[in-house]
Structures are given as C-alpha cells and as structure tokens.
Image (cartoon, helix red, strand yellow):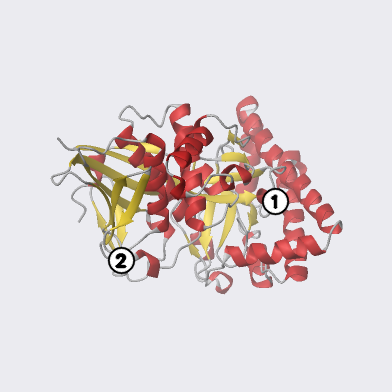
Amino acid sequence: MEQVRAFSAPGKALLVGGYLVLNPKYKSYVVALSARMHAVVSKCKSKNGGTRVTVTSIQFNNDRWSYDVVEQNGYSVNSIDGKRNPFIEMVIFNVISYYRPSLTEGLEIKIDVFSDSGYHSQAGSTIKRNVFKEFSYHPSSISEVPKTGLGSSAGLATVVTAALSSVFKQNLSVNNDQDLAIIHNLAQVGHCQAQGKVGSGFDVAAATFGSIIYQRFSPEIITSLPEHSAGSVYQDELKRLVDDVDWMITRDRVRLPDQLRLVMGDVNSGSETTKLVAKVNAWYNSNLPRSFEIYEDMNAHNLEFINALTELNHLSTSDPHTYQKIIDAIGKGEFSQIEQVTELAEVTHSVRHIRQAFRLITKESGADIEPPVQTELLDACMQLKGVLTAMIPGAGGYDAISLITTDKVTPATQTEGDERFKNVTWLDMSQADIGVIEENPEHYQNLQ
C-alpha cells in the first residue's frame, strides 16, 4: 500500500551577520521567508526487488533524477541514467546511511519537489494552481533558470531530508525537537558535501528552524567524516555525528516586531557568493589586525541591531499604546520622531554603520558587497514612507535588497514609475517565523 506525506521548508534572508557568520564566535540574524520548497513523498514495495529513489520536478521541464540504492558494505547510490543532482544525491546517501534500512524486499520511493515563485526568475513561466497552492512552471530545466538567492539548494536539501526521513521513521514529527535536530544535522551534512565545501550553514538552519539568531558550528564537525566508501565506518561516524555530537550552534528563534515586515526586492542581476567570499577572505587575511578590528566593530553593530529588535518586541507587548505611536511615525516617514525612540535609532544607527563597513570592504577588497549602484538604491529606499531601514542581505552584491517596513506599506506602489527603482522587482513574500512543516499531500494534486 502506498503511503504519502508532504513537507515544506522556507527560504532565508541574512539581515545582519554577512561574512561574520562564517566565524563561530559571531551571531547573525536570519529571517525565514514565506517562499518555500516542497516535497511530496510516496513509497510502495518494489516490483523487481530493488530499491529506487526517483525525484521529479514537474515545474522545471519535468526534470527527473533516479537513483538505485544498493546495500553492500554500507550503501551506494547510483544514478540510473547519468543525470545527477548533487544535493539530492548526497541527501539520499546520508539519510539512508543514517537510518540503515534493510533493503531485502526493495522499495519504490518517489519524491515530487516544488518551489514557490520567489526562488527563481519568472521570465517565460506560466502559473498552475489549485485551491491550496500555486506554482510557476518553466520550459527549461532547473539548472537553466536564474535563481534569486533565497536559499533554494538549502531548502531543497532540508525538505528532501525531511521527506525521505519520514519513509524510514514513520512516526517522524517536525514538531518534535529531536526529530528536527536530526533533519537539520543530516541536511547540513548533505548540503555541505554537495557543495564540496562547508559553508556557514545559516541557510539550512533557517530552512529547518525558521527565523533565528544563528551562530555556526565548527567546520571540522563535517570535514572529520570519513570517505563515503568507508561503508559501515562512515555509517557509524555519521550516526555519532547526528545523534551524539554537540554542534554548539546557536539557533534562538526570533520574529520581527509586530506590525513590521520584511520586504525583499530582486535587483535582476546575480552575484556569485563564492567569489565574493574569496575576495573578502583574502582582504581580511592580508589586512590583520585592522580587518579584525573592523569585524569586531561590525559585530558590535550587529548585536545592537539584534538587541534593538528584541526590545521592540518587548515594547509591543508591555506598552502597546507607545508602540503604536512608534509604528505610526515610521508609516508617516517622520524621521525626526524615529530618531528620538531609542530602539528605532539603534536599528537605523546599526545598519548605517554596517553598511559603511561593507562599503569600505568593497573598496579595499574588490568584492562588490555594496557597490555604488546598490548604495544609491538603498538610500532611495530610505526616503520612502514606512521604511525603517534598508540593507543588502547576506553576502551582498547585486542579487537583492531587504527593507524593514510597516505592514501597511507597499513599496511597489510608492516606487511605480520612479526611474531609480526600474531594475527592482518587489517579491511577493514576507517573513515566516517557522521552519520545516508537514503539509497535506492532497494540496499538491490537480494543479492546472
């Protein structure tokens, strides 16, 4: 009998902590987004006795990746048609290596993946929907459609990890902290191995846990794993790593203060994060100890930003009348009043200093974290009514901009016809407090 379950996981925006997030000593503020990756998984007994996992993306020209799983001195995951997706492949390998299922009877596992529109350029796409969901369908394969930088690969790794884990642990619950930690740890391993490097992990953490204050794990946690070919030795080490090792990460859940929301703008041109990071790292290493002092100063302002939002959250509940006045002042663009409110002044002050540091690093390293064209755009955003602050998320570059605004403001309306915003597409999404969730599999049927 076929069993079906469905899961989804959010995208992310790193508001403060860019570059510093790579160092375990620094905290960052990550907002999960309403754009989500989805996976619908079904399983049944195999007709030929073998075990096969097939992942299909009907949105992207019916992309399909099929793998035979063989149990022999551990497990091997073999593409059956030469078409490979490293993120899917590494997730399959690690989930199966962790759960160690007996494959003597054989399983046919099918996973349908979907992505919300915010993850990719919508050029040339068509919408298909039902009462519950809507998705953009593209005439090209997923590798050929430009991404918007919201963490699609991390979301994919996380949601496929959750879906495949539910096959081997039938009582898996994303509301259970232990199960969620297993999903996170397995997804981090698979995502890092697929990338060929150990990143900061904030994108997988946000996909799993939602909006969080994040401090990363030590890269050695993952690099210490043996080769895949080590068979049962790899399985033992992976099991220990997932279940017993203290990853020492911070993942404190947060939410933006009431009546404030995140607005994302796609700037219609991409940046290669790996190249930016390489340039910044080279600059940092060749400018010590001055570069360390710059990072320490940025960290102080990152913490100022985090603390100010925390205090605004407290104020919204302890003194709602005063808080409403603050929101009204932001909505009217009364900047002189905004500067008189300590918490708001700290938000704008901290972001101003963080941006100054990024412009300095841009100039000295050659990495376009906040290039002049983005500076002009952000400064223009700060003149809009209802905007508390504006920044370049994550590693910066030309990918996107992030605004914190009141929830009654629509920048798209204010900027329509304004030449300064001609390259900005305001994305139809908002912040999401929660990470991976279980969905109703019936909600993905009859899309048309």
Q: Secondary structure at mark 2?
A: loop
Task: Identify which residue is drawn at 86% across, 58% down.
Answer: 290
The picture places residue 247, in percent across and down from the top left corner, at 60, 36
Q: Position of 293 compared to 76: left or right? A: right
C-alpha distance separating marks 2 and 1: 36 Å
Q: How many marks?
A: 2
Which residue is tagged 1? 20
Quarter location, residue 326: top right
Which residue is tagged 2? 138
Task: Identify which residue is drawn at 23% across, 42% down.
Answer: 42
Lower position in the chain sequence, tag 2 or tag 1: 1
**The label number, if any, that marks residue 364 in the structure image:** none
Confirm whether residue 35 shows in the render: no
Task: Decide which of 380, 395 is in the foreground and name it.
Answer: 395
The picture places residue 370, in percent across and down from the top left corner, at 67, 65
Q: Position of 355 compared to 427: left or right? A: right
As shown in the figure, which amino acid type bears the numbered disc 1?
Leu
Residue 366 to residue 64: above or below: below
Label 1: how many Cα within 10 Å (few below 14, some 14–19, many 20+)? many
As shown in the figure, which amino acid type bears the numbered disc 2?
His
Task: Decide which of 118, 99 is in the foreground and name it.
Answer: 99
The picture places residue 334, in percent across and down from the top left corner, at 68, 50
Check the image and name the residue furthest to the bottom. Answer: 419
Task: Decide which of 270, 102 is in the foreground and name it.
Answer: 102
Task: Identify which residue is drawn at 53% across, 36% down.
Answer: 241
Task: Decide which of 186, 410 is in the foreground and name it.
Answer: 186
Confirm whether residue 241 shows in the render: yes
Q: Nearer the viewer, mark 2 or mark 1?
A: 1
Residue 200 to residue 182: above or below: below
Residue 203 to residue 414: above or below: above
